[in-house]
Image (cartoon, rainbow, N blue to C red):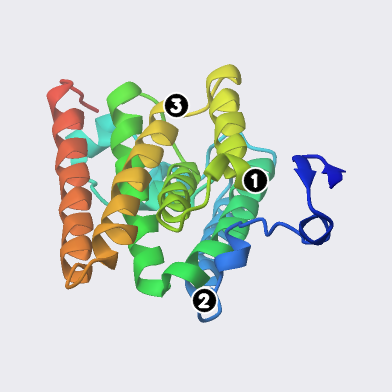
């Protein structure tokens, strides 16, 4: 018998390597085109922010941010519901967009290729809208921008996808990444806690629909319909929260 880090094994077994499963190991399918498109939209939006007067280092300002950021009083007073979506493509400075685009690139490379473009896009947009709802629930009077809610949703969806394939998210490293980012969310001031938590919750629910229900026989349409319903509820909830707070211009 041969001693190994996991105990005593026979010589033949000791020479065998244990396969470690990660998202990359189950990756298959076409190139992550949706991921690249989303990154391109975010970058173009950021360039437009800078051109309209926003500071590269952050701090807000500029016409693009003024007309596209998530802000409860404007949504309630002017019925500017597009802000629920456009806010997820704007960023408060170069560091903000670099972090979000890095995580979008890493998660998108693996998740879109294994899940497919339609399910990946559905997960992203659903998480973006639930993130907007979360931000309005906790801080309706704050100006909120960033793809963080959608990115947290991708993390939640990836957890479900890994579990559905028999992979422990903690062993893959994703679980620790989520815990670390949640810690940063609560420690560093100025971060939209509601946006992150709302996106994560939406990603977990949408991930279950897409990667568990959707894998069942004739379950794909049910999964997509469930995500559409979840996104619609997030929009309706966001409008109700903004109006119900008694907000005005």
Name the spot of residue 202 as percent of width and height, x first: 32, 43
Q: Nearer the viewer, residue 106 or 242?
A: 106
**Which disc is residue 86 wearing?**
none
Mark 3 or mark 2, earlier in chain? 2
Q: Quadrant of the C terminus?
A: top left
Label 1, label 2: how far apart the Cα atoms are? 20 Å
Mark 1 or mark 2, earlier in chain? 2
Label 1, label 3: how far apart the Cα atoms are? 16 Å
Is label 2 in a helix, a strand or a loop? Answer: helix
Q: Quadrant of residue 95?
A: top right
Side (left or right) of 48 relative to 208: right
Residue at 51% over, 76% down? 33
Relative to residue 16, is residue 90 depicted above or below? Answer: above
Please count the marks in the image. Answer: 3
Residue at 76% over, 58% down? 13
Labels 1 & 3 near each other (Cβ < 8 A): no
Classed neighbour count for the residue bearing mark 3: other residues with Cα under 10 Å, few (<14), some (14–19), many (≥20): many
Classed neighbour count for the residue bearing mark 2: other residues with Cα under 10 Å, few (<14), some (14–19), many (≥20): some
Looking at this view, name the residue that lies furthest to the bottom.
30
The reply to whether residue 231 is visible in this rendering is yes
**Which disc is residue 33 wearing?**
2
Residue at 28% over, 26% down? 137
Q: Nearer the viewer, residue 130 or 246?
A: 130
Residue at 54% over, 44% down? 169
Mark 1 or mark 3, earlier in chain? 1
Relative to residue 16, is residue 200 depicted above or below? Answer: above
Label 3, label 2: how far apart the Cα atoms are? 30 Å
Name the spot of residue 198 as percent of width and height, x first: 35, 35
Q: Which residue is mark 1?
A: 99
Q: Which residue is mark 3?
A: 193
């Amino acid at each position: 018998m041969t001693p190994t880090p996991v105990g005593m094994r026979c010589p033949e077994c000791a020479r065998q390597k244990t396969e470690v499963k990660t998202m990359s190991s189950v990756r298959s399918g076409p190139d992550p085109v949706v991921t690249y498109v989303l990154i391109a939209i975010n970058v173009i939006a950021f360039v437009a922010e800078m051109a309209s007067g926003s500071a590269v280092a952050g701090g807000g300002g500029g016409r693009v941010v003024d007309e596209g950021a998530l802000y409860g009083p404007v949504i309630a007073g002017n019925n500017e519901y597009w802000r629920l979506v456009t806010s997820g493509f704007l960023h408060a400075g170069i560091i903000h967009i670099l972090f979000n685009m890095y995580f979008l690139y890493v998660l998108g490379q693996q998740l879109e290729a294994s899940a497919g473009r339609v399910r990946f896009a559905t997960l992203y947009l659903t998480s973006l809208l639930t993130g907007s709802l979360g931000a309005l629930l906790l801080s309706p009077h704050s100006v909120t921008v960033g793809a963080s809610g959608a990115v947290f949703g991708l993390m939640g969806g990836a957890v479900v996808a890994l579990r559905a394939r028999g992979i422990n998210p903690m062993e893959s490293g994703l679980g620790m990444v989520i815990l670390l980012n949640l810690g940063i969310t609560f420690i560093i001031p100025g971060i939209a806690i509601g946006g992150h938590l709302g996106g994560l919750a939406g990603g977990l629910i949408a991930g279950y629909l897409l990667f568990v229900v959707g894998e069942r026989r004739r379950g794909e349409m049910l999964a997509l319909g469930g995500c559409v319903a979840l996104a619609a509820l997030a929009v309706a909830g966001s409008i109700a929260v903004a109006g119900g707070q008694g907000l005005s211009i």
